[in-house]
């Protein structure tokens, strides 16, 4: 059962009050800091991937197997971290885009998935 207009207005009013009272908490709940952190991790992992590629190539050119393997491990670890950061960032972005409220609203993050689930049952 979806929320009524009156309930939505009350929730939005509570959200505005929270933003005025504690903007840092509201920002954390919206996920803006989390997206920014995920972007930083993705960029850093890209830089580490290129560095790992350079180490891999140096090991191949110098015919030092251990250095080549180290470069591959660096590339693998950075790719894993980068993909996890990109997947986490895209799922939180898709929640904000497909929600029923203004983008960035806490209702997008907490309210709409429950309502969608409940609507699917009906």
Image: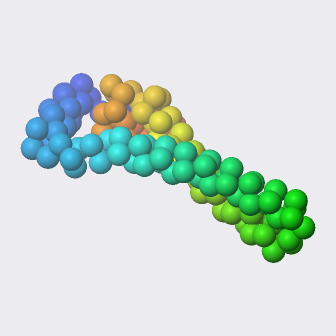
Q: Residue at x 35, y 45 (%)?
A: 33
Image quadrant where residue 43 sits = top right
Q: Is residue 20 left or right of residue 4?
A: left
Q: Residue at x 43, y 43 (%)?
A: 35
Q: Residue at x 49, y 43 (%)?
A: 39
Q: Residue furthest front?
A: 62
Pick the residue in front: 93 or 9: 93
**Percent position of residue 56, x then y:** 79, 60
Image quadrant where residue 90 sits = top right
Is residue 116 shown to the viewer in this render?
A: no
Pick the residue in front: 17 or 27: 27
Q: Residue furthest bottom?
A: 66
| As drawn, 86 above or below 70 | above
Is residue 24 shown to the viewer in this render?
A: yes
| As drawn, 107 above or below 71 | above
Image quadrant where residue 30 sits = top left
Pick the residue in front: 72 or 30: 72
């Amino acid at each position: 059962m979806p929320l009524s207009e009156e309930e939505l207005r009350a929730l939005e009013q509570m959200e505005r009050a929270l933003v005025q009272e504690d903007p840092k908490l509201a920002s954390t709940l919206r996920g803006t800091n989390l997206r920014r952190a995920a972007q930083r991790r993705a960029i850093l992992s890209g830089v580490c991937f290129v560095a790992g590629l350079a180490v891999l190539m140096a090991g191949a050119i110098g015919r030092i197997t251990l250095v080549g393997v180290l470069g591959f491990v660096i590339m693998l670890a950075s790719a894993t971290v980068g993909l996890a950061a990109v997947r986490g960032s895209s799922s939180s972005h898709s929640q904000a885009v497909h929600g029923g409220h203004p983008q960035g609203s806490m209702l997008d993050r907490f309210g709409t998935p429950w309502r969608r689930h409940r609507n699917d049952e009906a």
